[in-house]
Image (cartoon, coloured by chain):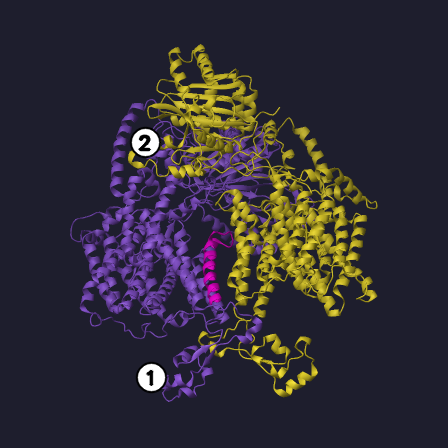
Chain colours: A yellow, B purple
């Protein structure tokens, strides 16, 4: 039976005017929080630093004081009576002290409570310093004001209803930090004038009992430690109090305290604690510094296991070496891909297993979605999805001459997303347009335009071929090869995509300076000399022009010679054969610069708002909200700025009606008629490229989503995923919608917004990650909402393109450096940064502890070179085989096995499957040998750390 | 006699192939640096966390092992012989082990050395993994490669000259971290197969001796700790080795080790160490975390004094309260102004004392300036000065219609600065144009322009009056009143100046949007319809115009009707009576937006470069350089960008010849002739304002420069300073140059660049601040260089004004938030930030520990209100009495004594002089009472902390 968690409160005896009272001075849930006397506030939770001295004094106290275990106690007076009785019995105090001690121990308890801000603001002016001449008294007065008098009995009589409900609320807020099963331990220390030797008692009650206002929170008391002593040693008593309080919240000692049969058990517990204790040398540390709670502390189990080996924990500075058991042999935990990727060798074997694995969860996939957290997740992901749909829609429209625009992007996202979330193997994956697909479409469109092939029909056939190829991959369990995809490949792939994003965004931006050239010769004073006039062609030319080119229908009645040439626009002027004369004709003022400001502003605002999450301002929830909505807020701000300026910046072209973006196309693409027959067959080749691309893109994202760190319980379905992606490829091709694959960044955001954490965590303690709310509801809702959003079209046309480029720049930079996702990001960028850092400033990455810097640099250099080669290839005519090149990365990774040791690769990358297997075999062998050795040496030494380290 | 500092190196016994060798595994100068086995590098210095267990084991080792004190040792073999002999004598080992132990202890030592980057890059490709199948062996191979074999004897034979000089250099680099008087202590631990119980020896040599390659650096060895033990407990031996190593570098224990007469003294030393030790509970801390060295550690003296009281140190978490000695009574150290500001009551008494104080230093003020550090200080401050001169010159030119421009600014700065640095009381102060003076000049110029008074003459008379008033202030020791100037006033003053800077910069920027309006109706396609034509007036009007207004001389021959109106510029067109017709006449394209980009770019680049100092990239020195030159680099970058664009942005107007900026004025201003006589008298009143302003501005800066934190040794001279500022006022007025006072920010930068730090500091230890190189040379050089810079004029005209506005915005923001100066900045801004932080996120400011949050907020609110009132007043016609309002701040501060307790004020602000005095008196009284109490209670308890706390 696990013992309850202990909450400890320490009260010290203080003289308040003429009266004595117990004042709360510190509390422990796991870490110490101290009452800042002057500041009238709780300190930040910190690690309790104790003095060795006080621990030894505490040991003496337990040895010599009264220890009452399993005392039947129902009220404080009765318990106090019992303690005093026992002490008198044992002749430790004289009976005439009974009343005095009783009196002191039953003084009222005053707790430090946090006041709501409106009340403390109201208190601001009150009780100035005029009435409090000395600091000591001033303080005393302050306590009077700010703390609630929680008297033991007539509590309700003292307080109006409002007040008590307020303070109850506040207490409840802290209650959330205490586990539900918690029991309290109360530590009371103080100095009194009537004792000449300490009065010590350690009490464990048979049943946890609520003892009136003894404890700050309504947690029943189980333990009581009392230390009253002669005057003059208050500091020392406090330290002893802190020592027992710290012990009580220690996992192992609290276990001992619950199970102790007698005084000796407690002493042994203290000794065990002392054995494990970590010591800081006095010359290297200032005891006044409060140590922030660490991110992680060793679990009680681990400590127990170490302890049972009768050896103190591995110290951080341990000089490694010695025998074959150095710290360095620790290998990083390899991420396991599990049986989902096993090669079955049967037709559709993987798909069958996937369905078999996912089917039992189908019902729970729906009812588990109904949780308050889902709402915020849906909103957040919805926003991400429409931002993506708008941005990619805009860019796709750009790249394909509006054959696929924002309207298609919205519809496609809605259709593909909903279907995938309903039937896919891993419904947490969010489908979206992704960079590689965009690039492929761009190249394809250019190719077909240059070769006079109908783009939409070609695309349809590629889609059909690709779909069939996906089915073949599914049927043959081909997904198993992604086992060979290591961090190296993942990093290479995602970095390349990021670079393309960044360079595209910047190219677009630079392009607008070409599209809207700035007249650098402009002199404000000579504005009169800058003009652009449309001059009519001389009669001769006009006549020829008239004869050769028929006028458009609507202007056929117009006589060219009768035109008011000065009123024509630039386009019209050229159309009618006029010539533009003047030194401002080829310039467009302001637009390029405004575009730049919008572009850069959107980018920097998004970055700043994202970073705001880590600032100290505002409550955590608000900051998280701001950070989550940062892209949306930036877009809104700069759309607003653009509207305010009212300049004719290039805007997102969206249809105002529910019809395809490009006027000439319908909702359905017909498979035959526009291209010669051989195109239908030949499209098999580009389809192969698309298939590889889709396969890589989809499965890399899936691997990342399914990583062990996410603690997914319902399993994954790589084959099932790919099956549906294939089906959707074909469907989207018929409807002329963009193609969709898993989008890494958004999928991770989806997981992040659905993660479950342990509810109550002690102040200062990091909440524990329990897993992810795996279900299909949020995904489906997101995409249904996206579908409904096509009616947003009238609003979307206000978005200037430079703002979207800014968002793209952000997405590229974010996925490169891992601003967006905290716990899962690429080391690649970090390793590049290492080149620029002197080694003493380098962060304490685990791989730097284990791999020599020059090997790290070599690894990074190889990666950079790979990327450079890919980048160059991408810029040539080879761009179309881009997806195949990613496969090249895996080959290079394979070759790196010859250059780097498995040890180094394990730290810098992951191991490849066979190697890993071999390694395990070796380990096993070694393990056996070690076991033998162990048996031999067991008598000699108990210090074997292999369990912990391998 | 102080004992030498100890450097400890710990070597562990390792099997290298078939051979045994001692491998360096950690070292301590003050903090621990560990060899990262895998990473082949030194870890960051960290606090040695020990286990209590290992300390007790060490104690046992010393109790049972061999202790040889003051052994005569000249070589390692002889010392080893002596140890073994002793052990055999005492029957601790059998004689047949002699050779084996001897063999092991004389194995060669291999040290971890850092390789230069070019060599490690060359090593990158070498020895791939193919030859090292397992991680264990792979590592072993690595060691072979990367470490130097420092064999005991034939060291020189093994190495070429280049190699050894290289490694010597590297070793010398580390040598700088070790104090010159240091002696080494060598710890050797290892497990061997021939022993069945540990072989322990602690040796102190009579003389520190260099024992061959035993130690990594050429530091003579004084102590030797050897622990060889049976196999299987390597970890435990390592921990013991770390424990003794940590003890040896402890200030108190090393003292004990040097003076110990026998084993018992050492044991007592360990016990004392144990008594002081700080303990972290195992459940709240992960021993694997390396603790960064703290900023400050308690000094040995303090530890001794605490120790002598036989009580453990005050723990950080100490629950306050108990008696009257709570932690909270600690008061912050008040900054003392010293006797320099005493009121002498004699005529020129203060000035006389100042001269008397400064005269003896005059010679050293010059020869102490000749130091390498001065060069970088001069360069840095010179850059700051010319930036300031350019910026303020530009703005002054703007504000005074070029009566004082950049040329005057340079000359004035050079003149005033040189004189002040030669004769001033505090030559570290840098004179400069400051914000308040700029504002005053602006108001004065507007006033005289509006009232038809000659500005330069009025200004001269104000200068003369002001100079005389300064003399009166000097003669009457008036500077003593700045004792009443507390942090509150300083903050109010500097914040107001900052706000004015910021708002002015932004106003100027917004102004350029008005000056260069953007045509928001512009449609790129209809460029043909946008023009601005100069139309000739109709003949009627032209004739009237012709008759009424005579043509300018140079165009008198011109007939207006014969003008080519379309070729005229905007100005000319209007001049000749033409009218501007067209929809682009009132617009100027691009300039406003480019100005904005330049403005904002300069600001953000400066901020980023300043912050770069705190990044991890590049060596510290380079980063400091980038940070120091950030303003210069930003200006250069954006001047370059502006030149690249080639747009007609507004530029800094500088004369290309050595003549006053404004054509109409000469170098000397004549006192009489242009204004009516009463102006000469009446200028007394504005002079009074200037005097107050100068007095405040000068003395506030002086107080900040002379703060105790700067550890100045040569004293200051407030009266002497003011005297010279007065003289310079008059001189500058006669020459028509700007007025100069001490500039806080630059002066602090001056001090910062001249600060002396302790040379050798242990790795991880903060270098100690020793003081400032107080001299007159750097200042004089800076200003002479500034004077020479007027020949830079041809270059300066390329600087666009928006860039300077950006610099101004930066200066405002920096002095508000304290980016520029790290150790001396205003809490005001921090306190404002507190409003927006939930209390759990608030930083651990000391005042928050001692003053309730609502009192802190109240204090801040009062400050904000004061500033708001000042701001509103500044915007009305009352602006001219601005300097007087600053006095108002001091009055309000005085009144705050009624609202806040002295305790709170001491934490949030400083105490006013009388109050401080009273407080001291009270303290004294209390102290005496306490002393009495102490005497009484001495027998009861030794735990009195009053010395430490009050």
Residue at x 41% of width, y 59% of height: B809
- Circle 1 crowding by C-alpha within 10 Å: few under 14, some 14–19, many from 20: few
Q: Main secondary structure of the magenta part?
A: helix
Q: Are marks 2 and 1 in contact (CB under 8 Å)?
A: no
* Residue at the farthest front position: A557
Q: Which mark is residue A314?
A: none
Which callout, 2 or 1, points to the residue nearer the camera? Answer: 1
Residue B201 x/y as whole percent: 51, 32
Left or right of A948? Residue B283 is: left
**Spatial separation of the CA atoms under disc 2 and disc 1:** 87 Å
Quadrant in which the N terminus of chain B appears: top left
The single residue placed furthest to the left in the displayed view is B346
The one of A368 and B636 positioned closer to us in this rendering: A368
Q: Nearer the viewer, residue B726 or B717?
A: B726
Which residue position is annotated with label 2?
A137
Name the chain under label 2. A
Label 1 sits on residue: B548
Horizontally, residue B540 falls left or right of residue B873, namely right
Residue at figure coordinates x 69%, y 81% from the top left: A549
Would residue B270 be seen by someone viewing this image from the given angle? no
Q: From the viewer's perspective, tell me whether residue B911 is left or right of residue A798.
A: left
Mark 2 residue crowding within 10 angstroms, few (<14) / some (14–19) / many (20+): some
- A872 or B49: which is nearer to us? A872
Toward which corner of the image does residue B179 lie, by quadrant? top left
Of A150 and B805, the residue lying toward us:
A150
């Amino acid at each position: 039976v696990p013992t309850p968690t202990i909450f400890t409160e320490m009260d010290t005896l203080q003289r308040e005017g003429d009266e004595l009272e117990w004042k709360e001075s510190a509390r422990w849930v796991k870490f110490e929080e101290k009452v800042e006397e002057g500041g009238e506030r709780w300190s930040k939770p910190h690690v309790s630093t104790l003095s060795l001295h006080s621990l030894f004094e505490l040991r003496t106290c337990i040895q010599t004081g009264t220890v009452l275990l399993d005392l039947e106690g129902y009220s404080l007076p009765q318990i106090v009576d019992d303690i005093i009785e026992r002490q008198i019995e044992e002749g430790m105090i004289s009976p005439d002290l009974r009343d005095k001690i009783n009196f002191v121990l039953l003084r009222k308890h005053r707790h430090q409570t946090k006041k709501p801000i409106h009340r403390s603001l109201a208190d601001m002016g009150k009780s100035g310093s005029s009435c409090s001449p000395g600091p000591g008294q001033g303080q005393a007065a302050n306590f009077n004001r700010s703390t609630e008098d929680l008297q033991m009995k007539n509590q309700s009589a003292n307080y109006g209803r409002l007040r008590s409900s307020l303070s109850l609320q506040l207490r409840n807020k802290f209650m959330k930090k205490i586990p539900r099963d918690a029991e309290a331990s109360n530590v009371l220390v103080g100095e009194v004038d009537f004792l000449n030797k300490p009065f010590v008692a350690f009490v464990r009650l048979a049943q946890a009992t609520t003892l009136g206002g003894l404890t700050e929170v309504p947690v029943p008391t189980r333990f009581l430690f009392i230390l009253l002593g002669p005057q003059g040693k208050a500091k020392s008593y406090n330290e002893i109090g802190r020592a027992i309080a710290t012990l009580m919240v220690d996992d192992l000692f609290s276990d001992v305290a619950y199970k102790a049969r007698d005084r000796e058990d407690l002493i042994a517990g203290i000794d065990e604690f002392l054995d494990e204790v970590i010591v800081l040398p006095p010359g290297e540390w200032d005891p006044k510094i409060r140590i922030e709670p660490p991110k992680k502390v060793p679990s009680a189990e681990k400590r127990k296991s170490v302890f049972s080996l009768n050896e103190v924990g591995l110290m951080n500075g341990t000089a490694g070496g010695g025998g074959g058991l150095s710290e360095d042999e620790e290998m990083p935990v390899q991420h396991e891909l599990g049986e989902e990727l096993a090669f079955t060798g049967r037709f559709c074997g993987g798909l069958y297993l996937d369905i078999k694995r996912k089917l039992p969860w189908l019902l729970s996939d729906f009812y588990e979605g109904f949780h308050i957290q889902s709402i915020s997740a849906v909103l957040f992901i919805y926003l991400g999805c429409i931002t993506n749909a708008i941005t990619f829609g805009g860019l796709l429209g750009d790249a394909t001459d509006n054959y696929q625009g924002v309207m298609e992007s919205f519809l496609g996202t809605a259709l593909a997303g909903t279907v995938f979330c309903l039937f896919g193997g891993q419904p947490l994956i969010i489908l979206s347009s992704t960079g590689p697909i965009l690039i492929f479409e761009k190249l394809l469109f250019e190719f077909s335009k240059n070769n006079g092939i109908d783009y939409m029909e070609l695309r349809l056939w590629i889609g059909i071929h690709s779909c069939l190829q996906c089915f073949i991959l599914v049927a043959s369990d081909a997904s198993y090869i992604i086992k060979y995809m290591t961090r190296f490949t993942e990093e290479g792939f995602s970095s390349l995509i990021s670079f393309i994003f960044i360079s595209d965004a910047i190219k677009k931006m630079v392009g607008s300076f070409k599209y809207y050239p700035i007249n650098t010769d402009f002199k404000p004073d000579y504005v009169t000399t800058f003009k652009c006039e449309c001059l009519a062609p001389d009669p001769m030319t006009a006549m020829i022009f008239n004869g050769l080119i028929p006028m458009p229908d609507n202007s056929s009645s117009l006589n060219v010679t009768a035109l008011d040439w000065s009123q024509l626009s630039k386009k019209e002027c050229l159309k009618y054969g006029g010539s533009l004369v003047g030194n401002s004709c080829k310039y467009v003022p302001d637009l390029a610069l405004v575009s730049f400001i919008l572009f850069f502003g959107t980018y920097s605002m998004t970055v700043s708002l994202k970073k705001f999450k880590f600032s100290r301002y505002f409550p955590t929830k608000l900051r998280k909200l701001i950070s989550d909505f940062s892209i949306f807020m930036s877009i809104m701000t700069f759309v607003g700025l653009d509207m305010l300026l009212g300049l004719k910046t290039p805007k997102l072209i969206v249809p105002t009606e529910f019809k395809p973006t490009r006027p000439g196309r319908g909702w359905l693409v017909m498979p035959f008629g526009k291209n010669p027959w051989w195109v239908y067959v030949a499209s098999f080749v580009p389809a192969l490229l698309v298939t590889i691309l889709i396969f890589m893109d989809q499965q890399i994202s899936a691997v990342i989503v399914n990583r062990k760190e996410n603690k997914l319980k319902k399993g994954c379905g790589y084959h099932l995923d790919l099956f549906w992606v294939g089906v959707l490829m074909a469907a989207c091709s018929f409807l002329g919608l963009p193609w969709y694959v898993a989008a890494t960044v958004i999928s991770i955001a989806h997981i992040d917004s659905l993660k479950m954490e342990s509810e109550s965590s002690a102040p200062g303690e990091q909440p524990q990650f329990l897993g992810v709310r795996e279900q299909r509801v949020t995904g489906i809702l997101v995409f249904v909402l996206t579908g409904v959003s096509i009616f947003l079209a009238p609003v979307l046309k206000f978005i200037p393109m430079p703002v979207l480029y800014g968002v793209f720049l952000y997405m590229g930079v974010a996925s490169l450096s891992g601003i967006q996702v905290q716990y899962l990001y690429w080391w690649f960028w970090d390793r590049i940064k290492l080149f620029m850092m002197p080694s003493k400033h380098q962060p304490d990455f685990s791989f730097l502890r284990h791999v020599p810097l020059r090997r790290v640099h070599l690894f990074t250099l190889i990666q950079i070179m790979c990327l450079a080669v890919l980048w160059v290839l991408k810029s040539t005519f080879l761009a179309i085989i881009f997806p195949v090149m990613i496969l090249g990365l895996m080959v290079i990774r394979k070759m790196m096995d010859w250059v780097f040791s498995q040890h180094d690769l394990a730290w810098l990358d992951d191991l490849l499957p066979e190697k890993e297997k071999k390694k395990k075999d070796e380990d096993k062998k070694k393990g056996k040998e070690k076991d033998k050795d162990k048996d031999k040496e067991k008598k000699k030494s108990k210090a074997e750390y292999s369990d912990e380290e391998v």
